[in-house]
Image (spheres, rainbow, N blue to C red):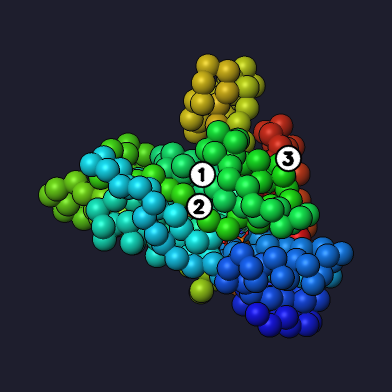
Amino acid sequence: MHVQENFSLQNYNTFGIEAQAKRFAEFRDIAELRQLLQAYPHEPKLILGGGSNLLFTQDFAGLVLKNSILGISQVADNQDFVVLKVGAGENWHQFVLHCLANHWAGVENLSLIPGLVGASPMQNIGAYGVEVKEVIESVEALAIADGSLRVFSNAECKFGYRESIFKNELKNQYIITHVHFRLAKQPNFKVSYGDIQKTLQDLHIQELTIQAVSQAVCQIRQSKLPNPAELGNAGSFFKNPEIPTAQFEKLKTQFPTIPSYPINAQIIKIPAGWLIEQAGWKGKRSGNIGVHDKQALVIVNYGGGKGLEIKQLAQQIQTSVREKFGIELKPEVNFI
Ligand code: FAD
Ligand code: EPU
């Protein structure tokens, strides 16, 4: 456990933005984490996973704590389910592969999401018709204020679309150390979302398995989302807006092709990528940054882009979508 000073975070965020941490340390267990918190009680803290949902707009004048708690253990097992306790520092996709190899179902649609297990409850990661809240049994977290441990049940996490209690009421108060997942031994396939069926056909899949679903999801993702190792990005920059049905009906008269996903009788979700593309931003480049040419919801850093430039571009996109559609886009990415 080594505390480094004036530490470059460029390789620790998938946007590849250069920013300095005043101090940086990795922790591998709860004892190390408590020691670090006690050593720097008055410094601002930033918990870092894989840095795939962060935008550094400035240096961080405090202690960056990189989560490296590893380990996967089985805490329950019966004929229907297995419950796993997973260290928050485990890589998310490696964990998905571990489940696939053991024929444990529930996370196959969430294949290839970057980042670490500990961040998965933060925004209740979701993709291709599944959200992680469907497989989370509980979350173990450590209070920054006094180092005490607390177990949050699924209900206590207050999961919503890209939301949880950890992003809201308890923001910056807890460090997630372990997540307990309940995985099924009999899969309940979810293949109705988007292009999954078509991709399964293209792949000539004869028998539907969780491995096949994962393969299809990986193929779709690779066709539109840039690989951060090649092009800096943080996935969807904004959330998909949810608007009242009455507002949607009005918009539809003006924009008859507007895509929509009903949430319930009152609320409709609109894909932000469509709004941004219609506002003319898709594939637009401004210096070292721009809007991805295959997915307008993704802002990219071609290299050397600054966090503040990305923030400004995001604001310009918000303004033009507001002016054209009267819809407010809210960032999904966490600004530092
Ligand atoms: P970080 O970026 O390191 O942290 C994110 C936030 O969580 C920060 O506020 C951080 O302080 C906090 N945090 C992290 N770990 C902890 C912890 N242990 N305890 C307390 N707070 C913590 N997301 C989706 O939901 N669905 C997608 O399909 C998806 N696709 C993506 C595709 C690409 C190419 C990229 C780059 C990103 C994508 N994302 C997606 C976003 C991102 O991968 C997820 O939000 C992921 O869970 C972030 O994990 P991380 O470890 O990188 O978190
Ligand atoms: N669209 C466009 N133009 C674009 C992009 C999208 O018109 O440039 C429209 C199309 O109508 C398309 C629809 O938007 O059918 C949906 O696009 P896509 O399937 O690519 O998904 P998304 O809504 O843009 C969401 C999540 C992703 C997740 C995918 C798959 C949010 C904010 N984003 O994207 O999550 O992987 O669905 O489930 O909910 C992330 O959170 O970082 C992320 C990548």
**Horizontal and vertical percent position of residue 99:** 32, 56
Kindly identify which residue carries mark 1: 138
Point 62% across, 17% down: residue: 246
Q: Quadrant of ligand 1?
A: bottom right
Looking at the rendered structure, the kind of residue marked 2 is: Val
Of helix, strand and loop, which one carries label 3?
loop
Which mark's residue is nearer the viewer, 2 or 3? 2
Residue 20 visible, this angle: no
**Horizontal and vertical percent position of residue 210:** 26, 50
Residue 75 visible, this angle: yes
Kindly identify which residue carries mark 3: 169
Residues tagged 1 and 2 counted as in contact (Cβ below 8 A): yes
Residue 278 vs 214, above or below: the answer is above
**Horizontal and vertical percent position of residue 44:** 82, 63
- Marks counted in the figure total 3
**Horizontal and vertical percent position of residue 25:** 69, 76
Point 73% across, 71% down: residue: 36
Looking at the rendered structure, the kind of residue marked 1 is: Ser
171 or 215, which is in the foreground?
A: 171
Of helix, strand and loop, which one carries label 1?
strand
Looking at the rendered structure, the kind of residue marked 3 is: Glu
